[in-house]
Image (tube, rainbow, N blue to C red):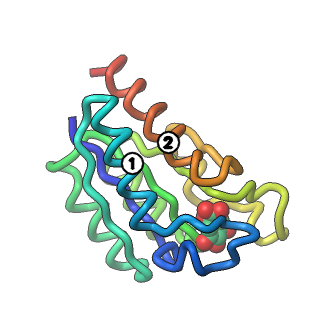
Amino acid sequence: MQILIIHGPNLNMLGKREPDIYGATTLEEINSSLSDKAQELGVDVTFFQSNSEGDIVSTIQDSISSCEGILINPGAYTHTSVAIRDAILSCGLPVVEVHISNVHKREDFRQKSFVSGVALGVISGFGINSYFLGLSALVDYLKENS
Ligand code: DQA
């Protein structure tokens, strides 16, 4: 079972970026721990990070034939991107949306997600554990529904 993990804009800066909100762990460290978790769960993962909305849309489109589900932290595009929402709808794959911070406790502009309404589920506010919880939930869903 193949899962695509997408990290949106500025998540390449994890570790340096607002550590009081996002913690001290780098994206490389998160991906390495996600690979270990995937191995435990018996699935394969591939990673993609981009600061570009169009590249994320293209990657979602290309994933249709190469994976069975997507775990995504859309970063700031969560709150702005109709294009990512439409790409998720058109790929037809189950998608779990994750956030390191609890976006609902933050600024008003973070209260709207264009992705949540087309996601299988959303996990927000558990620090980097949001990724592990999201991966585990997605794999459970795929195992039950394949
Ligand atoms: C984020 C929350 C977003 O509002 C923000 O723009 C990010 C990170 C999170 O993981 O908490 O870049 O997606």
User: Which residue is nearer to you in this view: 128 or 73?
Assistant: 128
Outermost residue on the left side: it is 65
Q: Is residue 39 left or right of residue 76?
A: left
Q: Position of residue 77 (x, y in %)?
A: 55, 72
How busy is the neighbourhood of tag 2: few (under 14 within 10 Å), some, or many (20 plus)?
many
Which label belongs to residue 132? 2
Disc 2 beta carbon < 8 A from ligand 1?
no
Q: Are marks 2 and 1 in contact (CB under 8 Å)?
A: yes
Decide: is 88 above or below 18.
above
Q: Position of residue 17 (x, y in %)?
A: 62, 79
Q: Residue at x 61, y 68 (%)?
A: 24
Outermost residue on the top side: it is 144
User: Which residue is nearer to you in this view: 113 or 43?
Assistant: 43
Q: Can the viewer see residue 79?
A: no
Q: Earlier in the sequence, mark 2 or mark 1?
A: 1
Q: Amino acid at mark 1?
A: Leu
Q: Position of residue 73 (x, y in %)?
A: 51, 59
Which label belongs to residue 141? none
Where, quadrant-wise, is the N terminus in this rendering? top left
Examine the image and state in which quarter residue 53 appears. bottom left
Mark 2: which secondary structure? helix
Q: Amino acid at mark 2?
A: Phe
Check disc 1 and report the residue beneath it: 34
Decide: is 67 above or below 41.
below
Image quarter for ligand 1 equals bottom right
Q: Residue at x 45, y 58 (%)?
A: 30
Q: Is residue 118 left or right of residue 5?
A: right
Where, quadrant-wise, is the C terminus in this rendering? top left
Mark 1: which secondary structure? helix
User: Which residue is nearer to you in this view: 102 or 91?
Assistant: 102
